[in-house]
Amino acid sequence: MENFAEYMLNEKDLVAKMEIEYYLSKKQDILFDKSVVFKTEIAKLFMDFMEIEVDKNLVLTACLLCNCKKSDSPQELEKIHSYAKEGAEYLKTIGFGRRICKICEEVNRYSKSSPREKESDIVELADQFGGMLLDRVERKGFDSEEAIVLLEYRNLKDKYNRYLETFIAFVKEINEIKLGDKFKIGVFTKLKKIHDSSSDVKEFIKNIAKDFDPVVGREIEKSRKRIKEEIFNETKNPNRALFSAETTKKIMGHILTKEEKFTQNEE
């Protein structure tokens, strides 16, 4: 019979995975609220849009679990420094393996775990960026442009995150996508609006599955197709800022299909 860890990891559908953790949180003293789902959705968007070559199931499971021992109330400094480590230790007790526990511990840098897993860098980016977009008691949430600047020049200043530049490019491109027929809003604005209007985490999960994922998934495919056409055809849009050669190379390194890479290599 599967234990909880096997059940969670073997479930590949993200919504179903969220529902599993929802019921666990009702039985155990762990945090699973709307902010956890919000940050996990950002990680999913990033990996889907940029086609990051990692185990997506592992990353999304870690996003859902890494804050399990974080308090949803104002915390003492000591607790802020220890919750990720405590969460990793707790996850071991319910059957999770060493690697995913290490990824969860590395959601922040306080435990000084090294070397860092590559999946941890994605979890860290989604957690910090997503947290800045959400309102807190002491402040309103930042918009995505402010948040990405703070992420690069404050939160991760003098710290190496292998996906930071790619994440910056992702935010820039996602902000080009506008949702809605009459009143156009950005993807992050839409996600935050659903977050704020949902009464609890269960309703938030339901609303994401119904009103967010299908719409955004289609727009991402359109946007990725447009990026490929612009770069491959060397089209120039004077109304749209172009990436530097270095950034373009990084983007295309992630979104090119294996077939396209093979074709380029043959040429």
Image (tube, rainbow, N blue to C red):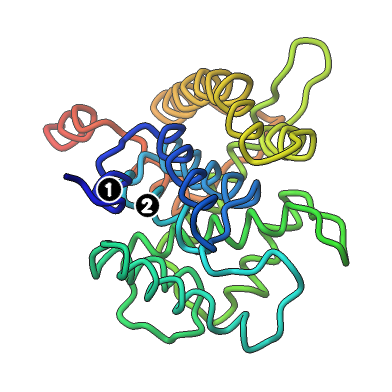
Question: Callout 2: helix, strand or loop?
Answer: helix
- Residue 91 lies, in percent from the top left, at 36, 66
What is the crowding at mark 2: few (fewer than 14 residues within 10 Å), some, or many (at least 20)? many
Q: Residue at x 79, y 55 (%)?
A: 142
Front one among 7 and 151: 7
Task: Give the residue type at disc 2.
Answer: Val
Q: Which mark is residue 55?
A: 1
Disc 2 + disc 1, Cβ < 8 Å? yes
Q: Residue at x 31, y 70 (%)?
A: 93
**Image height of 13 relative to 222, above or below:** below
Front one among 30 and 162: 30
> Is 148 situated left or right of 107 in this image?
right
Q: Where on the picture, by quarter, is residue 173?
A: top right
Front one among 30 and 257: 30
Q: Which mark is residue 79?
A: none
Q: Residue at x 59, y 78 (%)?
A: 157
Q: Where on the picture, by quarter, is residue 119?
A: bottom left
> Is 18 situated left or right of 38 in this image?
left
**Image height of 39 relative to 20, above or below:** below
Task: Give the residue type at disc 1.
Answer: Asp
- Residue 137 lies, in percent from the top left, at 86, 62
What is the crowding at mark 1: few (fewer than 14 residues within 10 Å), some, or many (at least 20)? few
Quarter holding the N terminus is top left
> Is 265 situated left or right of 254 in this image?
left
- Residue 206 lies, in percent from the top left, at 59, 27
Q: Residue at x 46, y 50 (%)?
A: 24
Q: Which mark is residue 59?
A: 2
